[in-house]
Image: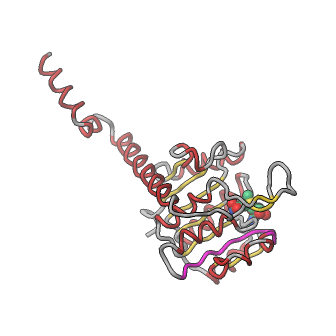
Amino acid sequence: MNRFVAQLRETLRRPRRVLNLLDAETRRAFFAQRRLESFVHAAWTASRSFDLSGVGYGRRHSGNPSEISTKPTTYYPFLAGVAAHTGATAVIEIGTHWGGSAVALMRGMLSRHPAPLLVTIDVSTESDNYLPAQPESRFIRKIVGDANDLKTVEQVRALMRKADLVFIDAAHSAKPTLLNTFLYGLLFKPKVVLLDDITHNESMRAAWAVLRAIYPYQSVDCATIVPAIRRRQGFGLIVLDGLNN
Ligand SMILES: C[S@@+](CC[C@H](N)C(=O)[O-])C[C@H]1O[C@@H](n2cnc3c(N)ncnc32)[C@H](O)[C@@H]1O
């Protein structure tokens, strides 16, 4: 009995020994979660070095649609932080709206590289209200079209063959979001995919459940780690660098 107690004490004194008691699957999940958590914390820490005041969302989608927001949304600093943390030089964004998120991403990219490229896609031309007047716009190419239309995909491929990061913030329903993720993920082989609004509605929750099932060790809702990134709506991260080298 005394030997058992001594062994137990020794095991608890060294947390890694406790991990050895777990089965391989649980251990893998534990270390994967730790890697994702440290990625999110590192990007969130990096985001603090960016002053995004004045980088606005533009016309609001919820509430009063005639109201124009000149403030960054909560995930803009995180976008800049992820771009900087990953050293991204080539980014694809699906869902431009006015272009606030594209400018935030570009600020992060420019902190590490003098001439990066961001291609942003939207069915609308609303970014004409804002994006061309931003100094970062000379590094940004806007494509007007449905991101899942193969003609649009060809237009993106004419500008960029490989992306470091893909940010998806467009249709907010399962099928187009999943198709965005598979098409752009497989074709442009990003190190990282970010998805806004993964808990916004039932359809997006279902899409995120599919992605979690495909990438159980590479995906996390960043808002469960740092809630300030995106309270309520969720913000998905899929880290593919081990798969897409
Ligand atoms: C929530 S807004 C994007 C907000 C922007 N990313 C930001 O954070 O500032 C979603 C945008 O996706 C666009 N969109 C919806 N479906 C699309 C599709 N199939 N292809 C391209 N853009 C699409 C909409 O026109 C809208 O401007």
Q: Nearer the viewer, residue 186 or 111?
A: 111
The residue shown at (50%, 62%) is: 49
Q: Nearer the viewer, residue 224 or 111?
A: 111
Q: Quadrant of residue 175?
A: bottom right
Residue 151 horizontal side relative to residue 190, left or right: right
User: What is the number of callouts on the image?
Assistant: 0
The range drawn in magenta is: 115-126
- Quarter of the picture containing the C terminus is bottom left
Q: Nearer the viewer, residue 2 or 127?
A: 127
Residue 223 horizontal side relative to residue 150, left or right: left
Can residue 77 be seen here? The reply is: yes
The residue shown at (53%, 66%) is: 83
Residue 52 at x, y percent in the picture: 62, 63
Residue 77 at x, y percent in the picture: 58, 59
The residue shown at (60%, 45%) is: 209
- Quarter of the picture containing the N terminus is top left
Can residue 151 be seen here? The reply is: no
Question: Does 67 lie within the magenta span?
Answer: no
What colour scheme does the image use?
secondary structure
Q: Is residue 6 above or below residue 168?
A: above
Residue 207 at x, y percent in the picture: 65, 49
Residue 8 at x, y percent in the picture: 20, 26
Q: Is residue 154 above or below residue 105?
A: below
Q: Is residue 199 above or below residue 149?
A: above
